[in-house]
Image (spheres, rainbow, N blue to C red):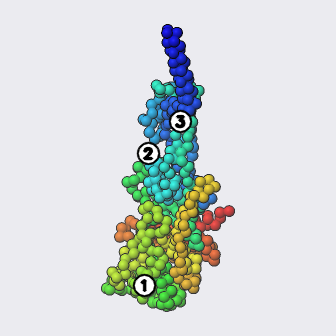
Amino acid sequence: MNKYRITIIMAATALSFALLAVRLGGIQVVLGRMLAESAYRQRTVEIPVGPERGKILDRNGYDLTGSTVALASLDLSSFQVSDVFTEPEQVRLRASSSMLVPKIIRYGENSLARHLVGYINPVDNAGVSGIEKVFDSLLSPEGSQRKLVVSADARGYVIPGLGYALVEGTQCSDLVLTIDKDIQQIVEEVLDSRIQAGAVVVMDPWTGEVLALASRPDFDQNGVLPYLNAAGSPMLNRALLGFYPGSLFKVVVATAALEEGLLYEESQFLCGGSIEVQGLRFGCYKPDGHGIISLSHAMAYSCNPVFIEIGQIIGPERLIEYCQAFGLGERTYMGLPGETSGDLPWHGLIVPRMLANISIGQDPLTVTPVQMAQVISALANGGVLVRARVVNEARQGDKLIQKMPIPASERIMSEGTAAAMRRMLSGVTRFGTGTAAYLHGQGAGKTGTAETGDGNVTYCWFAGFFPVETPRYTMVVFDERGISGSVSAAPVFAEIAERILSIP
């Protein structure tokens, strides 16, 4: 009996060990990998490292932000490394060692087109203005955060020999703009030397591609706080804001008169030094007047009484229709933050006295430099309105992610009208108010000087195209505090144009 019980106990014990062995084997074979991974995760720590973000490139692949990569020392005891980590307080490893990690500096000293590119909030890596804001989801998609994975024990000490790994986040897209770095750099260098507050836009008159866009005063993208309320409003992108165009608007008035068949280039007018409209007298800059003068010469010499008379002939309804055809009174298709539509009054509210003011580019009419680049481009290319655009595509290396749509163009005047306007604008630089932009016969355009009501502020413009015979570039120069379009803006146009034409 005792032997029988002993046998049963031994058998049960053997069976138990057999079952335990099977169970342990199952755990090791089936669950071993999962448990090992779980154990590893328990002793690894993920540290957020400087965020990943796509590049903003010019048309030839040049990084306009001037991004650089530097090495930063990581003290594993606190993870406080000169702004490398976004949330260092999340992890506190007790270690005396340190390591070097890459630190991305988003904006370098030589970054270009700062108002166009915009800037990010370094705390959350989100775009705040410009291209950075509009295309934030492409430049920094969800999950793009870079992480440093460090091995540590349960007490928080780094495990010797296991090291660390830098894990990249979701791949970001790079944006390819229409901007040409060489032209942009020329524009900014000339602006810095000649204009304290203003803007320059250079555009391809055939495609609408913006080749350069710059505004002054400038700002530092790495530290915008001092500029937010600074004198001169350096954060404003003046290329996108509305200003009185002054005599620059006369190109729209003349185009409307020619296209409607109301006048032709050699139509004659009498300028006696002033013109009266509803009891209000508007003077010519030449007190004795120009006498008998043609439309062509009135454009060249920018005769106010003649264009006020032409405005009355055209009438407010048709003049506003031509403004709208040129794209005035509406934002461009670029869709940039801070862009305004300018001020274009409803024709039903325009009385003759107001029409006189509008005809010479004064209150209440305002236009933006980008809008005027579209206007001049239509004259340069034979009468077709091409919409300004600044982004070509989004890419990830050689892979095309998104091709940006090209806005439709439309003919808004006959080729004959456009040719007549080009001849008249050539006269402006050959013998009129814009001789400083003559460019040895290669430059044509129109000056503009607008009174603002503030004796210390005069809006000065020159907008034109070059070369004259085969236009390749449209340029608008705006000086917010100049002397006149002839003195302040036309020479800037000439210097920039000469340097662009000398690019190899």
User: Which is more toward the observer, 55 or 497?
Assistant: 55
Q: Quadrant of residue 402?
A: bottom right
Secondary structure found at label 2 = loop
Residue type highlighted by circle 2: Val
Of pointers 3 and 2, the one earlier in the residue sequence: 2
User: Which is more toward the observer, 503 or 451?
Assistant: 503
User: Which is more toward the observer, 43 or 112?
Assistant: 43
Q: Residues within 10 Å of mark 2 (few under 14, many from 20)?
A: few
Q: In this image, 134 relative to 497: left or right? A: left
**In the displayed structure, would residue 157 be above or below residue 83?**
above
Q: Residue at x 41, y 52 (%)?
A: 227
Which circle marks residue 318 in the picture?
A: 1
Tell me the residue that label 3 is attached to: 149
Residue type highlighted by circle 3: Val
Badge 1 vs badge 2, beta-carbon distance below 8 Å: no
Q: Residues within 10 Å of mark 3 (few under 14, many from 20)?
A: some
**In the displayed structure, would residue 255 be above or below residue 30?**
below
Q: In this image, 49 relative to 457: left or right? A: right
Q: Quadrant of residue 382?
A: bottom right
Tell me the residue that label 2 is attached to: 123
**Which numbered disc, 3 or 2, marks the residue closer to the eye?**
3
Separation of residues labelled 1 and 2 (CA atoms): 52 Å
Separation of residues labelled 1 and 3 (CA atoms): 68 Å
Secondary structure found at label 1 = helix
**In the displayed structure, would residue 293 be above or below residue 362?**
below
Separation of residues labelled 3 and 2 (CA atoms): 21 Å
In the displayed image of the protein, which residue is found farthest to the left?
A: 279
Residue 234, x across and y down, in percent: 43, 57
Q: In this image, 101 relative to 281: left or right? A: right
Of pointers 1 and 2, the one earlier in the residue sequence: 2
**Which numbered disc, 1 or 3, marks the residue closer to the eye?**
3
